[in-house]
Structures are given as C-alpha cells and as structure tokens.
Amino acid sequence: MMKPAENLFIQEPSQSDASVRVRKPGETKSGRVICSLNNLLVLLFVFVVILLAAVLFTFLLSKYHFERIAETEKAQLKNNNQPISSDESQDNSEEIISETSHGPTAAELRLSKALIPLWYNLTIKIYVPGFVEIPKEKNLTFDGALTIKFRVDEPTNKIELNSLKLGLPSVLSDYAILEDSLVALHRRQTDDANRTKPKTKTSSEAINDSGEKLPPRGPSGVKVVKMIQNETLEKAMFELSDTLKKDQEYYFQFVYKGTIDTNLAGLYLTQYADKNGAQRYAAVTQMQPNYARRMVPCFDEPEFKAVWRLKIIHPVGSSAVSNAKEILENEETEHLDWIYTTFEESLPMSSYLLALCVSDFGFVEGNTKRGTRVRIWSRKEAINETVYALEGGKKVLEFYEDYYNITFPLSKQDMMAFPDLALGAMENWGLVTYREKYLLYNSKVYAPSQKQAAAVLVAHELAHQWFGNLVTMKWWDDLWLNEGFATLMEYRGTDAISDGAFRMEEYFVYDSQGEAFGRDARATSHPLAFPIENAEDVNEVFDAITYDKGGSVLRMIRSIMGEEYFQKGLTTYLNKYRYSNADHTDLWNTLSEAVPEGLKDWNGSKFNVDEFAKPWTEQMGFPVVYVRRVDKNRIELSQKRFKIDEDAKEQLKDRNSKWGYKWDVPLWYSVNGEEKPMKWLHETTQFVIPENDVVVFNVGSRGFYRVNYEQDMWKQIAAQLMKNHTKITSETRARLLDDAFTLAQAGQLDYETALSLTGYLDKETEYLPWAIALERVKVIQDYFDDEPEADALKDYLLPLITKPFKKIDWEHLDTSYLNDSRFFENLLDAELIDKMCSLRDENCIEKVTELYRDSFVYPCQIRNAQSSQCSVVPVPLRALTYCYGVKYGKEKDFDRMFEFFMKESIQVERDRLMSALACTRDTHAVKKLLVMAANMNSDVVRLQDKPSVFFKLTLTPIGGPIVFEFFLDHWSELYNGLKDQLTILIRFIHVSISGKTQRHIDELEHFLVTNRNTTRNLDAFKQRLEILKTNKNWMDNNFKPLAQWFKAQAEQRRTEEL
C-alpha cells in the first residue's frame, strides 16, 4: 500500500465507505463459494477448450510475426547493400521518411469524451533542493494528492486519464470514487435494502482554506477493480466495478508521486549561480503541448477545460506562484521546514495552461488602470532589469482591453524570467514564463533588436490571455488560431509598448511575412489547419506556418475587411466562445457576420470569410501572380502556386488539393504611385493599364502572395525606383525586392533583372528595403561561401554598400542606440557594418578588430570581471566585435572568450560570447564546442541553448561541414537524450543539416535508411532533405552563370573608372 503524504488533502471526506467489500454472486457471508461436482466438470471442460484455442492462436500469431520480421530484415539488408542512385533518390527517400508510423497515432493517444472534467483540487509537495534538508530519496521529487470532479456524458465503466512517468497507487483500495452526500446516501439506502451488513456512517462536511463549506461527499459504491498504466499511450486506465451513470457527477480521489524533470518539460528544475557563486534552484512548469500529464494525472487535451485549485507545500525560504492569486501565503505546517500557499480557483482553462513555480525570486509590482496587479519576477540579482517589462506589461494589457473591448478577466498577471525554458516564453494564464533574455532589459547590455525582442515576447504572450486562454482551439490541428492571432497582435502590442517607435506594422513585412513565405514555398510545408496524424506532429506544428503564415493570412483578412469591422468581429468571437473552445470555422463565421454590406467577393456576392479563408488555411502554399501585357492598354493577371523548387514533390496526400492550389487573391495595386481600390483575381483577370504607366501589385505587402511581371514591366519598375523611389511606399519597395530575388532563386526570373532593382539603393534611407536587400544578397553569399568566385561577388556588392556605410557615425554608436525614435536607423547601421565586414572590407575589419582590442581586451583584464560589466564595446556592435576578435585572433583569444562565457550571468551577453566562440577557424576548437554542446549530462551549455551552439557553428564555412558529420555520427546519443523533449530534438535537426552537394544528399539519405526507426516520424528530416536538394539545384543552375556575370560587372566598372 502506498502511504499518503501527510496533510496533502484539504480536509477531504473520509474514505471509509470506499473500502467496503461487495460480495460477488454465489458467495456466502463467510466468503466460501458453493460448487457441485457437475459444475466442476463443466468448468474443467471449458478450461481445456480455452487452453487449446490459446495455444493455436499463439502459434499462428507468432508465425505471422516472425515472417514479417524476416521480410523487414531482408528489405533492410537489400537497402543497406545497394547505393541510392540520383535518379532514385527522391522516391526512395520519400518512402524511407514517409513510412507509416510504428508508434501510436494521435487518435490512439486521444482520451474518450465519455467523462468531462469540471474541476481539479491538487495539493502538491515539491522537494526542490537548496532551501532545507531533504531526505535523499525525496530530493527532486514531488507528492501529489488529487481530487477530480467530472461529469458523465456517456455511460462508462472506466476512467481514462493522461499520465506519464508518475507513481500511481498499486493498491486499488487507495482510489476513491465519491458522490455528493445526498446522492451517496440515497444509493446506500437502496443498497442496504439488499444487505445484512449495518450501514456505514456518512462522512462529514469538508471545509476549504477560506472557511467555506464544501458540499459533503460520500462513497459512490463504484470502485476501481483494475489499473493499467500505458507509458506508450501516456495513459492511466481505471476499470470500475460498476457503470458510471450518464449526467451524474463524481469525484475521483487518490495520491501519487513523481519526479522533478531536468529536460524542461512538466515540472522541471532550473538552476543558476547567485552573485556569490552559490548554486540556487527553482522548480517551474512547462505544460504545452502535452506535458501536464508528467506532473498530474488529468484530461490533458485542450478541449477539456476545467477549473484548477492548488495548494503548494514548499520549503521555508521559497515562495510559490501559480495561475491564480494567492489566498494564504507561506503558512506554517506541522513541519518547521515546510510552508504552504493556497490559491484562488482558476477560470476554466486547458491543462496545458496550468503553471506553478517554487523559487526564491524577487519581484517588482504595479497595477493597470483597471486595477489588475502585475508582477515581474526574476533572480534577485536581476531585479533591476525588470522595470521595462513591468511598464510594458501594464501598457499592453490596457491596450488589449481597449482593442478587444473585453476587460482582462484575471485579478493579477505574473510574468517570470527563468534561466531555463525550452521555448522563448509560455502564455500560462495569469503566470507567463519567459527565458530571461526575453523579459529582462538592461540598457547597458541589450542592443535595440534585443530590446524589441523583449517587447515583442511580452506583447505576444499577453495577447494569448485572450486568444488561446479565454478562447482555446479544440485540438492541436487548430493551434494556428492561438499562435497566428498572437503573432498578428504582437505587432500592435509592441507598438503600444514602444509608443510607435518600433514601427511594427512595417517590420511585419520583413519579419513574420518573410518567415512565412520562406517556409510555405517548400513541398514539405503543411496547411495551417491539418490533421494531427502521429504524436510527433503535435510538437512539429509549432513552426513558421502556424505562427507566421497564420499571422500573415489574418493580416490579409483584416486588410480586406477593414480595421473597424475586423475588430468588431474579433470582439464578438471572444465573447461568444469565452471560457470554451472553438475551431477556425467558428472564427470565420463570426467574422463574416461583421463584414460590411458593401464588401463584395470576386463574383459580386457579399464577401464570406469562410469561403475566402478555406483555400488559404486548408491547403498548403500560396500563389505567385503573373502579370503580362496583352496589348498597349491592357494587362492580364493569372496565378500559380509558388514553389522555390518546382521539382520537389509533396507527400502523396498533399499532391491533389481540393482547391487545385488556386486562391481568391485580393489585388491591392497602384498606378504611377497612386493607389487604386482593391480588385480580385479568381483565375485570370484583365486590367486597363496603358503601357507607359507603372503598375505595382500587392501595395503595402498586404497580401500573402508574390508577383512576377514580364520583363518590360520589371524594367519600368526599376526605372521608377531610380527616378523617384518614394512614389512607391517603403513596404512595397521591400516587397518588390524580396519577390524579385526569390523568383530568381526559384528560376522564375533572371538574376540580372533582380539585381537591377538594387541600383537605386544608394538613395534609400529606409530600413525595410535595405533589410530585405541585404538578406536576399546574403542568400547568394551563402551559396558562394568561400569559393574563389566569391571575390567577384564581393567586388560587385561593395560599391552598393559603401556610400551608406560611410555615413555611419561611429563616434556615437555607444549612445545613439538608446534613442528608440532612431530604432530603424540603429538597426540599419549595425546591419551595414556587419555586411561590409562579411565582404572582407579592410576598413571595416580594421575598425572592428580595433574595438575588440581597445574596448574589450584591455578594459577586461580585471580579475573575475564579467564581460557585461567590463566591456565598453558599443552594444550594437558587440556580437560582431567579439566574433572578429576570435576569428582573426590567436588561441589565447578563444580561451579568453571561453573564460568570459563561463563567468557571464546575463543571458544576452552570454549568447554573444558563445557566438564569438563559434567564429573560430580552428577545427579542433569547433569539435570541442560540439562535444560540449552534445553532452546531455553537462550544464556548461544549458539544454535550451545546445542546438544554438550547433547553429552558430554552421554559419562559418569551416563549421558547417563538421557540424553535419558530427550530427549524423552522434544521432543515437542525441535521440536517446532528447526523445522526451522533442522540441529541442527537432531544433537540433533543423540547425545541423546543411549542404549544397550531391554528397550531402547521399549521406543524409543513407543515414535515414540506417536510422529508420528513430527518424521516420520526424518531418524535420524531410524538410532538411528538400533544402539540400534545392541547394544543389541552385548550384547546378546558377553558380557559374552568376559568377561570370559578377566578374563581367566588376571588369566593366573598372573599365569605366579608367
């Protein structure tokens, strides 16, 4: 029998009746069973028949099983001994990595909907180290006592919960199924009429911590007769003695145990060193997507919303925080080393939003205008870095309340910064958790882009308090509803925090829309809404499609409807489905109700959001609109799905879309700089545009599509940019540059035309077009890499960048970055410097290496100094300066940087130091860094940061090939160490696999054959294989012609200069 942890239940009713034994039919009061000789012979005959049948069945099943194994081994032997030819590689690799999963499907992991949870009452004692003495066997564990109240929607004789790696009672009498006392009393009176045993005394009323009376409960008469824990299905299944009756409410009560995780999932441990170097610990939760089951047995699916009430028993010296506001805080227990904190009931919420923390953190506090208490928590050493988040959090909560016209539904909002978090942040209702670098802000260490990132994450997570928390998707196939809306709203929210200084509506074009275009142009993309087919899909759906395409499509719908009507529809949607769940059809229908009467679709009917949105959300990809001139006065537009590699094949299920990969395309356009009313493209359409007029489509980059013009029209646009680029808006200029270079990358436009658009850039003063141009040029740089032909590319690009580069005021870089009104200018200065140095400009490299020597090496000779305290390198240039210090330095520079990395306590500075280490040109040092990052038992690099080390190393010509080989060679160790933390494992896959040759493709395909069992369900491998093939195709088709073109351009320029 499992001993209950002391005082874990909050005065729950006695379970005495729950252990009363019910006699089976045929059993006497004494417990003996009466059986005649005839009955015995019949039973013996039945037993023999069953035994023979079982033997026959086992033989047939074993025969079939071993035949299948033999066939599989034969096929594997054939595959391993036969090389994959280039002609067969596409089909073979698809077969390898698209094979049906041998693990559980998503449907098998789902719970029955026979029972619906109403509330959970959880008391949990958390043995987090570092505060009081803890018995060795209890260290890094927790004890839980749980009562679940549920309603029966369909009669059933079992209870099914999600549970993983929890110690549930093995003694069945430790489980109790209770009813409210009036129901229980009636049931006992009915049962007593058929019993001779005296009636058991009913339980007394329960009292909660506020002194309120809880409804008295008593035994239901239903008992657990069998318990099965299935770790594969992540379920605990309880078979019952009787059927639970429809519409009846029951209470399921038991105690259990668990382990505090170290893999950043469920209830896990985070640790750090304080200012004196002592190790400090905290326990915190990460429940999304399906990790709540690692801390508490529950209905761990989004649709099962319920109220949560918590009591946390924690060590003296620590504090406890959860979703709801505290009732009793740090109250004494009968054990002097332990205290407890209780919390108000949460609002109905999904289990993935459950959150708690036990730590010794400090906090700053403020209140919104409507009285919501806001606290920002951090390590005590970082408490002075929480002020920006506090002020920003209050601002954005007030902004969202006004925007949605819905008051924030909670009385408090906590936000906590942790050294360890698998993702950037998590939107737990009332208790948002962040990685430190995304919540804290220190003006002496954070560059403008890092300040912006902190504001964006705060805005994103607090947007979720309405979209995702108040209204939640029904299942993970509609995760984009949560994340797409939070992505869309984060831009408005960040502008509210920065008072518009960050110009986020413009930044969207470069940021989220750019990410979405890149990911959705591939054959391995997926629709926004798609069936979750296996367990791994739940983790892999957290990607650029879900976040960035979701935000981009919603932004397009907002542009079609107009801000006022879109906003009205959102408010209606949130009010209609508050505290419940919805799917994307619910959203479309609600938005359709808000559409203004005069808004028509392509065929003249009233615009219907559902009809418009389905092709954009239920099929992958997006269109490229082709514009060609029909005659002197007319142009014709048509559409086709855009793919970066036309030869790449989708999975079979995605090759024939219901909509034929066609979309209704909203056309925002301008003629000679004057914007015209929006029109529609259904299949083809014609416009009256005289041939001398300059027409540009997708003005403001509002639509999620690209545009390709015929050659003469591109020339007109290039001429307009040279003549007066301001007649075309900044966002539109950025869209033109991005479309042209991406179309060229895909082989749908010649590079000469794309590069001709950059001729005006020496007149460009806006950040957005420059950022796009520099990013697209970097794509070409990455292909040229360190090949000898890169010199011609350098000679072509340097003159484009030299003029704006020379305008940079180096003397004031250490102060100008603090001026938020110069946000775009500050970003542009830093990116121009980075680009010039990457082109090996001697002046740039000389300035940066001088900064390294004079502003880092010399002032940081103080013993035990941290880089963040001693470095006087201008903050926007620190990452670049540190990198070039290592790149062009000696072994002692690498060693010095590593010492500073080990001592640094501020995450953003520590990241810079690691990035600098990855700039090394020493292959021995590269391998040392890889071994260090891949060691799952070492905390030199935090688990969340380990993939980043691999990624930073791939950014150099030396590091990329070494990382690729190391990853393939050490896959087994990585997989075994991270198979329970798929988020981080998937990141390792994405950052490690790079290349542009057939050799890389062959190596990866052979690897996938050899490691089929551990790779077949991870779509990240399909994505990376597609990228390798796209890269090889680009090299085959573009490298030599472009190298010759750049060389000719450089020679022509030199001739003109003479």
Image: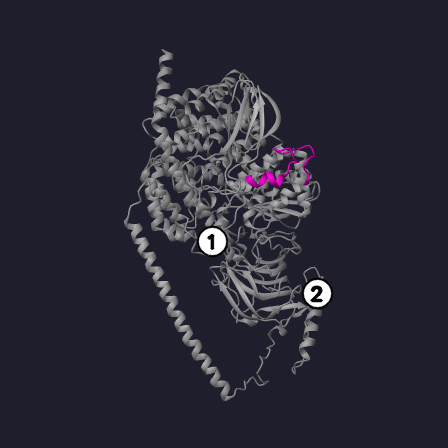
At label 1, the amino acid type is Thr
**In this view, the mark in front (2 or 1):** 2
Q: Which mark is residue 262?
A: 1
Residue beneath disc 2: 215
- Give the SS element for disc 1: loop
Residue 588: horizontal and vertical position, in percent?
63, 42
- Examine the structure image and report whether residue 613 is included in the region drawn in magenta: yes
Q: Is residue 786 above or below residue 1015?
A: above
The reply to whether residue 439 is in sight is no
Residue 643: horizontal and vertical position, in percent?
45, 35
Which is nearer the eye, 1015 or 389? 1015
Which is nearer the eye, 131 or 979? 979
Part of the protein shown in magenta: 593-615
Which is nearer the eye, 820 or 134? 820
Lateral position of residue 247 relative to residue 727, left or right: right
Lateral position of residue 401 relative to residue 907, left or right: right
Q: Is residue 260 above or below residue 393?
A: below
Lateral position of residue 1024 relative to residue 462, left or right: left
Which is nearer the eye, 843 or 786? 786
Question: What is the residue that sits farthest to the bottom in this orientation?
Answer: 37
Please tell me which of labels 2 and 1 falls first in the chain. 2
Q: Quadrant of the C terminus?
A: top left
Q: Is residue 222 above or below residue 969?
A: below
Q: Main secondary structure of the magenta part?
A: loop
